[in-house]
Amino acid sequence: MTRERLYLFDTTLRDGAQTQGVDFSVQDKRTIAEALDRIGIDYVEGGWPGANPTDSGFFAAPPALARARLIAFGMTKRSGRSAANDPGLAAVLDARAQGTCLVGKSWDFHVTLALGITLEENLRLIGESIAAAAARGGEAMFDAEHFFDGYKANPDYALACLKAAEAAGARWMVLCDTNGGTLPHEVERIVGEVVRRVPGERLGIHAHNDTENAVANSLAAIRAGARQVQGTLNGLGERCGNANLVSLIPSLMLKPAYAERFETGIAEDGLRHLTQLSRLLDELLNRAPNRHAAYVGAAAFAHKGGLHVSAVEKDPRTYEHVPPEAVGNRRHILVSDQAGRSNILSRLREAGIELDARHPKVARLLEEVKEREFQGYAYDGAEASFELLARRALESVPDYFRLQSFRVIDERRWNARGDLVTLSEATIKVDVGGTTMMTVAEGNGPVNALDAALRKALIPVFPELEGIRLTDYKVRILTPQDGTKAITRVMITSSDGAGESWATVGVSPNVIDASYNALHDSLTYKLWRAGRRG
């Protein structure tokens, strides 16, 4: 059976850039565009030429995309100007791109209120602007802003806006749920009505996520006849974000209701790079990935309960709706106080440790995990600490270094320039290979100072620790009722600069002591992974 073609349109670099706290550089935009091109996205919206220096700089030297078409975004011309005499429109049409997407009003309320013009004049703006874009070559697209609200208020006028763009030569008319308030059953009904007047193969959907329905609304629009879907990586976008392409793409390619009927420009190999692409974006934005993101999150295929793990090992389909490898992710067996032997054995196998299920050390390790989690440890988010705990139970991890003492001093004072500063200084005494060393270091906070002092002592002996950096640090108060005497849990994520990262945990009534315990595990884990055995 011949499948219908769906076209994927990514607007991360334009709509996603409107996310609070997101500020792409020109190089960031190039990197993301090239990554989208590699997996097989059809259209990459690069930004709004002339609107800001970053977007203008990006289009001044755009990346050479092999498969994706680079699209310049803008708005329809201003009232009272011709298309040839509108500087804003000219900047978009002159951009070095393979297509143009122009946004215009399709809600009569907005036309009269925001633009202050007649409904007929707005239709002329749409038609003349799209005609100018089509005349430049490349694909011309019309983003019908607030289309669903406009259709509910005045369906004839909303449709007239689409017909004006279609008559002017638009390849695509994109139905925008701009305020994200439309629900899936409404989207499916309205798109179904629209395709009776406008060919579905020329309709797109652009959904915002203000009701947490952007992905569902996009799927509903496709079911009803739309054949282009717009969205962003990881659901970036203003307010609550846009439709998340990282969720949409595997749903379209792996779920039979869509995969048997439609095809995209992404091959299986491109799909297997989806997790990497999602995390690339987070890395560029210096954000921790969402562990619970559908398909690509670290917890998306994580199994904690013992009965679940046992069932998954017999047949993954019992608790996994798609194979994790299909999207570049992997199965994750967690260890916690809810764990059974299956969890322990599976996690040990991941670490390269093979033990028979009846081995007495398995039962002892399981009991130790449960006891330590009762004390406040959490191993389902600190796999490196669990692996060390397991290897120590098997008596196979050396004491690379042994702490004798440490002292941390924080000083808050006015400096000579009259600025209020806070300084942290750590002094540490540690035994390394039978030699006692004492080092002092300053840092940006007590944990950073402690880390710097410890590594100052260790790096001459263990140079592989040089490249480690702490990428995340979290503190949780476990017994808040105890006030300042509360038990604290510290979780540290470390990276070696070569793409590997690992998490460790420490628990203590003293937050600095808990931090040291997590830090000790982090450095020990790196040395073990580096092949140090003594």
Image (spheres, helix red, strand yellow):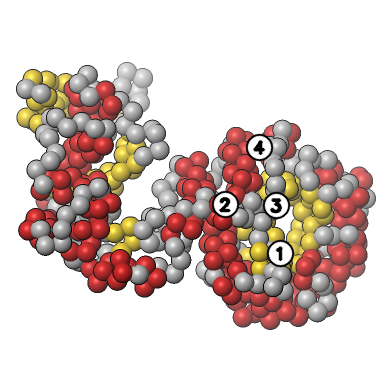
Query: Taking 146 as reference, is 298 left or right?
Result: left
| CA distance separating discs 2 and 3 | 15 Å
Which residue sits at x=82%, y=63%? 116
Give neighbour class at mark 1: few <14, some 14-19, many 20+ (Cα, 10 Å): some
Please give the label number shown on residue 43: 3
| CA distance separating discs 4 and 1 | 33 Å
Q: Are marks 2 and 1 in contact (CB under 8 Å)?
A: no
Query: Taking 290 as reference, is 179 left or right?
Result: right
* Label 4 vs 1, first from the N-terminus: 1
Asked which quadrant contains residue 185, the reply is bottom right
Q: Where's residue 178, x and y in %?
A: 66, 64
Q: Which structural element holds mark 1?
A: strand
Residue tagged 4:
54
* Label 2 vs 3, first from the N-terminus: 3
Observer-nearest of 103 and 264: 264
Which residue sits at x=90%, y=68%? 120
Q: Is residue 205 above or below residue 273?
A: below
Observer-nearest of 265 and 200: 265
* Label 2 vs 1, first from the N-terminus: 1
Amino acid carrying label 2: it is Gly
Residue tagged 1:
5
Give neighbour class at mark 2: few <14, some 14-19, many 20+ (Cα, 10 Å): some
Observer-nearest of 489 and 364: 364
Q: Where's residue 223, x and y in %?
A: 66, 75
Q: Is residue 516 above or below residue 232?
A: above
Residue tagged 2:
270
